[in-house]
Image (cartoon, rainbow, N blue to C red):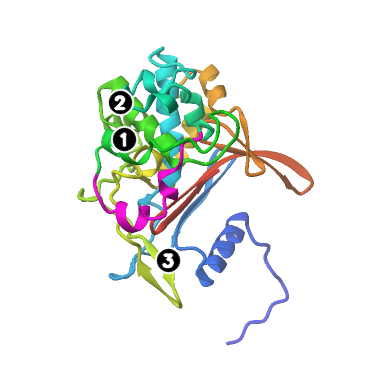
Amino acid sequence: IILVSSIVLPQSKTDKIDNLINRYLEYRLFNGSALVADNNEVIFKKGYGLANMEWNIPNSYDTKFRLGSVTKQFTSMLIMQLVEKNKIKLEDKITDYLPYYRKDNGDKVTIEMLLTHTSGIPSYTNQPDFFEKTSKKFYAPDDFIKEYCSGDLEFEPGTKFNYNNSGYFILGAIIEHITGKTYEEALLENIIKPLGLSETGYDNFETIISKRAAGYEKAGSGYSIAPYLDMALPYAAGSLYSTVEDLYKWNLALLNNKLLQKKYMDDIFKGRVDARNSKYAYGWFIDTVSIAEQQYVVYNHGGGINGFNTINY
């Protein structure tokens, strides 16, 4: 039986999203999970491609991925919680909390400069041999800072923006020195447990984590397994994992001031420096985009780490 019809049903919004992502999948530009919310209601969530290519295990909406620099949102929240509790001030210097840090630089660089990538401290991930020689080794936070986050300043602190993983690594150590807890423990106590983010955590390589995706890189017409990275090194700048659903819970908590008073939430999202045709706040880029002749302010941050890419709007 052949049925022919001139009637074309209009595509729903979710169909359009699904078709778009499938096109990216077809051209090997996407392999992962996506969630879209409209007016604070989830309208779409789905996995695409494979979480493990060796076992042919598909991605799902609850697959866990490394977040890379989306972690910085969580680090800035921990810092602002300490500000709210009057345990730290944004104008305080590195050497107020890390007495071992070199004084000529540490006496100049404030907490706010670390948050806004205006410290002038060189980023350890920009060192020529970092990924080849250093990234596979374990370092305790203070030891790593002494060796890899204490270089000569690239510019006078506070004078310009230069995206910098060293700054957020240092913030993680400051959180540890103030709280007496590890960065991971501080996250669990102050963010993950209060918000019920049961699918989010610090990605310890040796821990068995259900539904954790493997990381891959494109290699010619196929893929290769991403190089190993000791997750002690991304640390407060990039070591979390999560799911798209937990990131949605995180975004809702930010909208509803669940973790901070509104005054401090407003501080987090205030654009402070010019950055890559955007503004940068505390762990967030702020962009203005035009859609259908309307202007929208978009708060966002991406993350890239061996084998993984993330974007949170």
In the image, taking residue 226 as reference, residue 165 lies left or right, namely right
| Residue at the image point whose x is 28% and y is 36% from the top | 141
Q: Residue furthest top?
A: 86
Asked whether residue 63 appears in the rendered view, the answer is no
- Name the kind of residue labelled 2 in the image: Tyr
Asked whether residue 114 appears in the rendered view, the answer is yes
Q: Are marks 1 and 2 in contact (CB under 8 Å)?
A: yes
Callout 3 secondary element: loop
Residue 137 x, y percent position in the rendering: 25, 50
Residue 139, compared with residue 214, is above or below; it is: above
| Residue at the image point whose x is 35% and y is 62% from the top | 226
How dense is the environment of label 2, judged by Cα within 10 Å: few (below 14), some, or many (20 and up)?
A: few
Q: Nearer the viewer, residue 279 or 208?
A: 279
Q: Is residue 129 magenta?
A: yes
In the image, taking residue 126 as reference, residue 135 lies left or right, namely left
Callout 2 secondary element: loop
- Name the kind of residue labelled 3 in the image: Gly
Which quadrant does the C terminus fall into?
top right
Q: Which residue is mark 2?
A: 100
In 3D space, how far apart are the residues under numbered discs 1 and 2 (Cα atoms)?
8 Å
- Name the kind of residue labelled 1 in the image: Lys
| Residue at the image point whose x is 25% and y is 42% from the top | 139
Q: Which residue is mark 1?
A: 146
How dense is the environment of label 3, judged by Cα within 10 Å: few (below 14), some, or many (20 and up)?
A: some
Mark closer to the observer (2, 3): 2
Residue 233, compared with residue 104, is above or below; it is: below
| Residue at the image point whose x is 43% and y is 25% from the top | 104
Q: Which residue is mark 3?
A: 49
Callout 1 secondary element: helix
In 3D space, how far apart are the residues under numbered discs 3 and 1 (Cα atoms)?
41 Å
Q: Which residues are magenta?
A: 120-138
